[in-house]
Structures are given as structure tokens and as C-alpha cells.
Amino acid sequence: MKLVSLSDYLLLRINRTPSKAASDKSKAAGAGKSNAEKARGKGAEKTAANGSKKPDDKGAAKPAEKMPVNRQIYQLIREAILAHTLPAGMQLPSSRDLAGELGMSRNTVTYAYEQLLAEGYLESRTGAGTFVADTAPDQIPEAAERIEPLTDPSGKSELSARGALLTRMAGVGERQWGAFMPGVPDVTCVPHKVWSRLQNKHWRRSNSDLLTYGPGAGYAPLREAVAEYLRVARSVNCNPSQVLITTGIHQSIDIVVKLLGEHGDSAWVEDPCYWGTRSVLNSLGIQSVPIAVDQEGMRMRLANLRRPPRFICTTPSHQYPLGMVMSLSRRRMLLEYAAAHKVWIIEDDYDSEFRYGGRPLASLQGMDTHDRVLYMGTFSKIMFPGLRIGFLVVPESLAKAFSTGIAELYRNGQVFLQATLADFMAEGHFASHIRKMRVLYAERLQLLMQSIGRHFGEKMAITGGEAGLHLVLGLPQECDDVLICEQALQAGIIVRPLSRYYMHARGARRGLLLGYASVPNEEIARSFDKLAAVIKRHLPG
Amino acid sequence: MKLVSLSDYLLLRINRTPSKAASDKSKAAGAGKSNAEKARGKGAEKTAANGSKKPDDKGAAKPAEKMPVNRQIYQLIREAILAHTLPAGMQLPSSRDLAGELGMSRNTVTYAYEQLLAEGYLESRTGAGTFVADTAPDQIPEAAERIEPLTDPSGKSELSARGALLTRMAGVGERQWGAFMPGVPDVTCVPHKVWSRLQNKHWRRSNSDLLTYGPGAGYAPLREAVAEYLRVARSVNCNPSQVLITTGIHQSIDIVVKLLGEHGDSAWVEDPCYWGTRSVLNSLGIQSVPIAVDQEGMRMRLANLRRPPRFICTTPSHQYPLGMVMSLSRRRMLLEYAAAHKVWIIEDDYDSEFRYGGRPLASLQGMDTHDRVLYMGTFSKIMFPGLRIGFLVVPESLAKAFSTGIAELYRNGQVFLQATLADFMAEGHFASHIRKMRVLYAERLQLLMQSIGRHFGEKMAITGGEAGLHLVLGLPQECDDVLICEQALQAGIIVRPLSRYYMHARGARRGLLLGYASVPNEEIARSFDKLAAVIKRHLPG
């Protein structure tokens, strides 16, 4: 159908339902429409399909319903130009004439024309009127035609190899809260009133430094508080200038690798280990070399030692996820090896504040006399994960480069949150929150152990019950722990399969990671009953 | 000096100042010390230096001052073991005996022993007593000795090549607030009371979903609000499932490259462009190919078109930093080229809410019919940079992979902030804040233009004054804009040199980026007077 005039085209498609009302009832859209309106809608759609050679379907009819009329006119003319229904060079009626034909105010049309002029769809020639601009694409020189497309011709996956690996191997769970989600503290215990009070104090002051981009290294008073805390509680050797505030372990690893590593380097990772470590390394082109762990922690083979990696990623205070502590001899060996071969040790100390049998253990960093350790931790487990504040301690000689790198790559901010946390620490709430949580989590650990004992006696090995927020319940090797987790989820229980934390399925130990910290005391037995029922279906014999 | 007994060693070094008091006056440390204490301190240090073959200096004397005595004993014995002053296999006195010799309570000693046992420095043999453990490093097999260190033998820089490039070329400034910092909105105008009220509402409810790890894609109501806003204000074609919440443009580019690109791919970047784009690409091993811009935006040469990149990074609505709008023909050419060669277009739409001559322009994404555009924006310029919330709109077919990728790589959280922002939008504060700021920034732009005119007449070209938060003041090519910026900073004025935004110094235009949005009206003329004085010293003739 060749259009007779621009006004006909527009009249057929404009939806005159007042925009505000339409928007208000948009959710109940179909239901509220009169038959007449529905018919008009259909007619308009039909016209569009006929009237344009290659209709720009997207965002046409639907959004228009909510739009003011002037916006609709703009959109309809734009579509017609893109579809060549209004060809380049064609003169448009004056805004006054078009407004008359449409029975609308001239402003309505002027608005649309001005917007189209600004965007280059129309051009105005002085004294002559308004014309459809030539919006044909800049010509692509012929030579370009010969070029082959870059991505797979099958069109099957558009992800890069790196992206496909990353999403296929993703370790992150769909749900992040409930019994027995590992690695999550009880966020309902955060002293909300205190936190709000401290937060509001900073908002009232309206301090521009707290709301604009932050310094790369983080808010100075928070860095001081963290340095002090780490010195006393974790025997970390540091002054505040070595402490950098990040958004957590993931970002800490990302910046360490970007500043100290090259694409193609390798990293030793504990096997099993935290999935996040492996994924961040993968995403940066670092090859993970799995190192088995025994009761003393990472156990390198000769073949490993012959090829020093760029990085060694380790959780010496509390192996993740199995829970053992790295022995002193193993620690010293790692440090000597790192010093001799210029390897960087990435020490992830994610939750050792919660050690139920005594004080937290000293860090590996504190024993390092050659500046080879990059020590990192997080406030996610002590405070709440949504806070997204962590820290990274680097050797003094690297502090400046790291501060620049963080500012350059992430433009971290949220100084208002960092300031709130600094006050929270300075006023002593932090230390007392840790103490309270340690008592609470110890109780929950006991309750969970009792439940396990009631169902399984001594039959199943429990590891990692000395510290942290979760334990590992060992399963017979013939059990499919992944399947158990799926079935448990159907029963409303979140558990994670130990085998998935290994790099290769072959040789992976079977078991379940059970987080107890976030589960209210009175729910533990009941939830474990449900889980035990699922497990029992899978036990041999 | 050979030690006579463990108790002598300890007595010489223990600092008996009560820990609490010591901690309180720790800042005024030296001043408050008695001469006797000072002498004792010195003696202890001397002993340590003599008594240990290889003293573990770090964290020794200083932290000890603040520590309770039991902790000091633990630390001193630990150092002695590491230094082999207490050799492996040596039997320690019983805790009762040692306590007696030290004149301390037995608990004090027991504490230290237990901690050392837990950490593996001591071992207890049933019925026989407590012994120094063998903490010699695991033996490193000989073969490992032959290996060459990985990093540069000069020991000059420990950064990787990537890290060195990144920190050397860093574009981020030291200061982030003050006249005429570009790219920063007036954060003091954020409606603080409203924001605090909305924030507190969520804190009072103590909703665990808001405090634990967030869903990869972000908080659903915020995604809906953003989708609605982008459809209406920016002609973006999207539904909420395509909108992903990130921490800003940097993270949006990072995830796009990690999921859709490989190390070694290339990306076209506008020349000049935002430094952050180039740095994030560099950090991921993507080669930036500079594409000059003219009045219509990016202008590809034949040589460029012959080699399709993986990505095209562009700012079509408001070229950064020069400010032009990409012409419609250029837009259509880019889209056709991207579709033909499976190139991804990264559309960075960072501040086009603030267009002073009319409505914001339609996005490139809205014209795309082949799903080749990844559209990104930020709340940093509309709200405040410290909020660290941005968004990324991806084709529907990629939404699931991006949601997984974001959760896996960043574990984003801060749902409580996202919820606050969603409410802020839903209650209409967002739209009215934009309107208010647009009026305010237009005023400031006028004031700055007047100041420029007063000092320089029409002599210097101003570009980019139609939209955004900054303009570019052109300088004669013989001016050193970097030097002018340094001298301006000494005069208390922040400006950024245009030449630095180009990939290569050769051919770079000289000029100054002047941000006006965050400068109070009454300060604009005064601050520009200072800047003009610096500029005039550099003008030729």
C-alpha cells in the first residue's frame, strides 16, 4: 500500500488514549480495552506491516501505548524514514499544515519535527521547508565485502571460548539464603540500629568526599582500622599504607593478577578450592594447576616444584572447603619456595575470625620476610555479604601501584559505606559483633553435629568443624553428591556438592558442604531431617 | 649469647605495661615512657639481635607494646622457634614451672602454650611434656634448584608488563572534587533526606535478601525501573530481563569483554576517548585500535574496515570528551557493518540525560535490528559517583549468560542500595532530580561560557557545550596542555588536558576539559579567573 499522505499514515497509528491514564493501567492493559480500541490497534499494526518494506518491529506498538501523542508522532515518522516509506529528499508538510490535518495543536507536531531534526532524520532548508534527510548508511567500501565473519558460522553460541567456559563451569548458586547455604553469616544479626545511626550521621553532613569517586586505596580511617585489626587479630605485618580497600576477594584477586601477572601465566590452586578463585583466574587467562591437599594443606609434587607458577593461591588458616590448617613446615616451605622463585602467594583468609577452639591462627603473611605474600580478606562473613567491602594487604613497595590500579580499573567509590564501617569499628561494635557471632555459630555448629549424629552416628566423616561458617559431611564415594544436592533443593534445602569444588570429577571426594551460620537454631534439626531423608535414599546397602 | 633458660629470655623482653593503658596512649607512645622503660626496651631489642641467628624483625618490638602479656609470651616463643634459638626437639618447662619462674599466673602461660600447640610450633607428647616441633621447611627436592626465577632479574619493577603499562598510562586523577573536575555531578544536591528515609526503611525491615549476596542480574524492581526509564527517555528497546545491574561502566565493559571476547582480540575506540575504556580493555589483553572522530562521530578508514574488530566502543549520543553527536548515516553504517561482520558494539551512554538544547537523543541500541549492541549507562552522573550503580542492556539471547557471569565473577551485592534507588525512581524523585539538575547545570554552563568569553572573546573554540557535565576549551596547538593542567593544579584548579585522551601524543589536539556541573555558581567566575591567568602565560604572541 502506497501511503496517500503523511497525515493518513499517522492518523491510522496514533493511539489517543491519554498517556497518563494508559500508563496507570498499563499492567491491566488488555483487560481494560474497549473493543473499538482493540480493533483500532489491530488496524494500525496491519497498516504498519503493509506500509513499510522492512518494518522496525521492535519497540513499535507496545511502548507507543504509553507515550504522549507528540512522542508517538516522532516515533512513527522515524520508523517510516528508516523503512524508506518516507524516502530521502521528500518534503514534509509544514508543522502548521500537518497539525491541521491531524486535528492537533501545532506544538505537538513541532515537538516531533524538532526532535527528528536534532537527530538527523529530517533536515530543514532555509526558506524551502523540511525534508527527509538522506540517512542511507555511509557506503562500506567494496573491499570490506570479502571479509569473513569473526564468530562461529553455526551461530550456535555467541559467547567467546572464555565466556562459554565461564558460564558452563559457573559455581555460583541460584539461591543465596536458607538452610544450609554455606559461606553466609546470619545477616539478620547485624546491629541494624547502630548501623543506620552511623550511616545517617554521614548523610546528614552531606560531605562531598563521601559521595564522589573514592581514592583508589580506600577511605583512610578504614584502612587504619583494618591495619590495626589485622595486626592484633591475625598477626599480619602491615601499616595502613599497605592496606587497600576492595569490594571483596574477587576484586582483590582480579587486581593482583592484572598488576602482577600476564595472560598465559599459571597459578597453583588448592584442589578442592573456592570456585570463585578459579573463575576469576580463568577469566584473566591464568591457567589453574590443581594441587592436592592433605592434613597439612597443599602438597606439592616434584613435577609441580619444577615449574614455578606465577601465583600460589592458598587458604592456609582454614582450607576452603575442607577446613584444615596448613602446617608450619608446609608454610615455611611455601615461603622459601616463593622467595627463591619469585612466586606471588595469594593468601585468602576469608573467615578465620570464627575459630571455635581458640584464637584465630596467625597469618602466613606474618611469617613472610621476603614480601611475597598478598594477603586478602573480606567483611562479607563478619558483617554481611551485601556490604561488598574487602581488603588487600600488599608489600609496601607495591602499595602505590595497587592504589593507582584500583582507581584506574574499578573507580571504586561508596566511601559513605566505608566511613560507616570505619566508625562501626572505631566504636567497638565490630569486635563485639564478632564475639557474639562466634558464640552463636558455635551453638549452631553443635546443633548441626547433634543432628548428624542422631541420623548417622559416627558413620560419616565430618571435616572443617573447628572454624568458619560451614562443615563438610563426607559421603561414600559411590554417592552422587551433585544429584543429592539437586534433590535436596527440591525438598527446600540448599547444600553444595563437595565434588564440584575439585578441578576434575575423577578422584574428587564426595560430600556435602553444610552452612550452619545463617540457620536459626530452631530450624537446624528440622532442616537436617529433610536433608537426611534425601541422603538416606542414596546410601549404599 | 646463649640463653640460660626460657624464663630469662622471656623476662628480658616482656613489657609489663598493662595492655589497655598502653593501647590508649599508644599514639603518644615515646613521650609517655619513663627512662627505665626506655632502657628496658633497648635491652630487649639488643638481646633479640644477639640471641637469634636470623631475627624475625617484622612485627616484633612495636606491636608487643600493645599486647597483653600472654600474647607477648606466645609471640616471643614463636620468634625464638623460628630463629632456632629454641631448637626443634627441645623440651619446654611445664606451664606451672614456667609460670613460677616468671612470677605470673599459670593461665597466662597456658594460653601461650595452647596457641603455639594449635599453630604447630609446639607438640605435646603424652606423659612426656611439651616440645619444640620440627618446623623446618618441607625439603624442596634438588631438581627445583635449577629453575630460573620468573621475573626480571634486575629486580627493578615487580609489576607484570600489563601492570606496568596500566599504572604508567593511568588516566585517573589524584583529586576527584573541585572546580573544574570533569565528569562529576553536584553531589551536594542529592536529596539527602529523601534518600536517608528510603534507606532506613529497608534497614528497619531487616530483610535478609537485601543483605546477602545479590542475584547476578541485580534487584528485580530496579531492573524494571531502569528498563522503563530507558525505553521512554532513551528509545532503548528492552524488557527488564535484558537489563543487568553492574557497578558502572568499568564493570560493564569488563563483563562484556570477558564473556564475548578473547585475549588478543581488537577493539575500535574513539580517538580521543575516555581513559577508563582503554585501561579496562588493556587489562584484559584487548588491543585498542584508535579511530579518529569528526563532526559526525567515528570515522573509519578503509584499512580499518578491512579488519573487523571484535568490539566497537563508541559514545554516539555525546562523544567523550569532544561532545559531538554521531550522525544518522554513520550510525546506520556502524550497525550494518556490525551485523555483517558479527562485531559487538559497546554503546557507552554515560551522561546524555543532560542535554540543554532539547530532549536526549535516541540510542544507537534502539535502531539495532540485529542484536549487535551492548548498551551501558551509569547512575554516577545523575545521582552521585559513590553510589556505584550502573546498568548494561544485552540482547535477550545473552541475558542469562550475563547474569551468571556477573554473579560468578563479581558476586555483586548491595541490594539494599539497589532497593533504595528503585524506590527513589518509583516515587518520582529521580525524574525530578534530573529536571532540577538540568536547569542548574545549564546555568553553570552559561556562567562558564561568559567567563571564557570575558577572558578570551571568540578566540578559543568551545566544543561539547550542548550536553553533559563538561566542555572542551580548545587551545592553540603550540600550547602544552599537560603543563597548563599541572600549573593550574598548583593554583588550586583541576582541569584535564585534552591531548591525554588521545592514544598517541602525535596529532593530538590541545585543549582543556572543564567540568562545571559540580562548581557552585558563585565560584565559577573566580575559579576561571585563576585558570585564565595560567592559560594566558602559555598563549603565543
Image (cartoon, coloured by chain):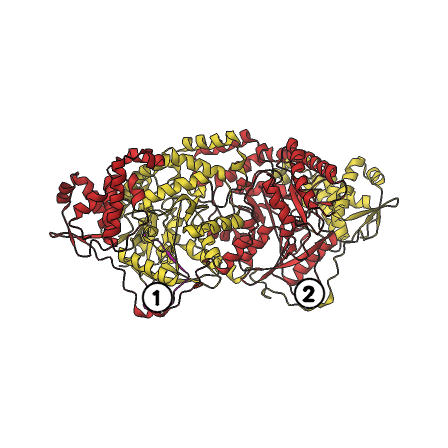
Chain colours: A yellow, B red
Q: Is residue A506 left or right of residue B394?
A: left
Horizontally, is A330 left or right of A408 in the view? left
Residue B223 pos. (x, y %) = 56, 43
Q: Residues within 10 Å of mark 2 (few under 14, many from 20)?
A: few
Q: Is residue A286 magenta?
A: no
Q: Chain of mark 2?
A: B
> Where is residue A120 shown, x and y percent of the image?
76, 48
> Quarter of the image holding residue A196?
top left
Q: Is residue A465 visible?
A: yes
Q: Which residue is mark 1?
A: A305
Q: Which mark is residue B176?
A: none
Residue sticking out furthest to the left: B127
Residue B227 versus residue B120: which sits nearer the camera?
B120
Q: Is residue A311 magenta?
A: yes
Tell me, yes or no, whether dots 1 and 2 are on the same chain: no
Question: Observer-nearest residue: B176 or B240?
Answer: B176
Image quadrant in which the C terminus of chain A is located: bottom left
Q: Is residue A375 left or right of residue A149?
A: left
Mark 1 secondary-structure assignment: helix
Q: CA distance from mark 1 to mark 2?
A: 48 Å
Q: Amino acid at mark 1?
A: Leu
For label 2, the SS is: helix
Q: Residue at x 42, y 34 (%)?
A: A423
Q: Look at label 2 and name its amino acid.
A: Ala
Numbered label attached to residue B303: 2
Give the residue at the far right of this rendering. A127
* Rendered location of residue B125, percent (x, y): 15, 53
First to last magenta residue range: A300-316
Q: Are marks 1 and 2 in contact (CB under 8 Å)?
A: no
Residue B220, percent across and down?
53, 43
